[in-house]
Amino acid sequence: MAKEPGLFRDIDMVLCSSSTRTRETLEEVNGCLSDNTMVSYIDALYHASSEVILEELRFVADNFNSVLVVAHNPGLTQFLHHVCECHGQSMDKSMKTGSLAEFSVQLESWHSLEYADLKFIRMIRS
């Protein structure tokens, strides 16, 4: 996974597929996360579709501000494309192993999250 100084510092929640591969990926950045970061391993994220990823984000408690999702393709790439389409952005990139897509979100509750609430910031490739 892409490593950039300070990139993971503010993450307070991680949603990670329960697969061995995603657990290994998360281990690569674990030292960059705060000791207070909560990690949730979720079976539903194993080869999840974009819609399942969105649904899992809706379950995040509202006291969490910054969430990292560690999951699989093609769902992650589909998620990226849905977000970009909502804002008229053309996205011809796909999420490669170890890549990170950064989004900003402005909403009062994760429970009402829609693709249009997210704005694509950048992609970082390892």
Image: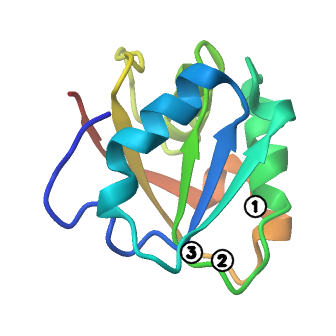
Q: Is residue 21 left or right of residue 102?
A: right
Give the residue at x 32% y 33%.
1
Image coords of residue 84 (percent x, y): 49, 37
In contact (CB < 8 Å): disc 1 and disc 3:
no
Label 1 residue SS = loop
* Residue occupying the far left of the picture: 5
Q: Residues within 10 Å of mark 1 (few under 14, many from 20)?
A: some
In contact (CB < 8 Å): disc 3 and disc 2:
yes
Give the residue at x 51% y 70%.
66
Residue 113 numbered mark, or none: 1
Mark 3 sits on what residue?
Answer: 106
Give the residue at x 20% y 67%.
6
Residue 24 against residue 29 in the figure, above or below: above
User: How many angstroms separate mark 2 from mark 1 (CA)?
Assistant: 7 Å
Residue 11 numbered mark, or none: none
Q: Is residue 71 left or right of residue 6?
A: right
Identity of the amino acid at label 3?
Gln
Label 2 residue SS = loop
Mark 2 sits on what residue?
Answer: 107
Q: Is residue 50 left or right of residue 119?
A: right
Q: Residues within 10 Å of mark 2 (few under 14, many from 20)?
A: few
In contact (CB < 8 Å): disc 2 and disc 1:
yes
Residue 14 against residue 56 in the figure, above or below: below
User: How many angstroms separate mark 3 from mark 2 (CA)?
Assistant: 4 Å
Of the pair 112 and 57, the residue shown nearer to us:
57
Of the pair 36 and 82, the residue shown nearer to us:
36
User: How many angstroms separate mark 1 from mark 3 (CA)?
Assistant: 9 Å
* Residue 43 in view, yes or no: yes
Label 3 residue SS = loop
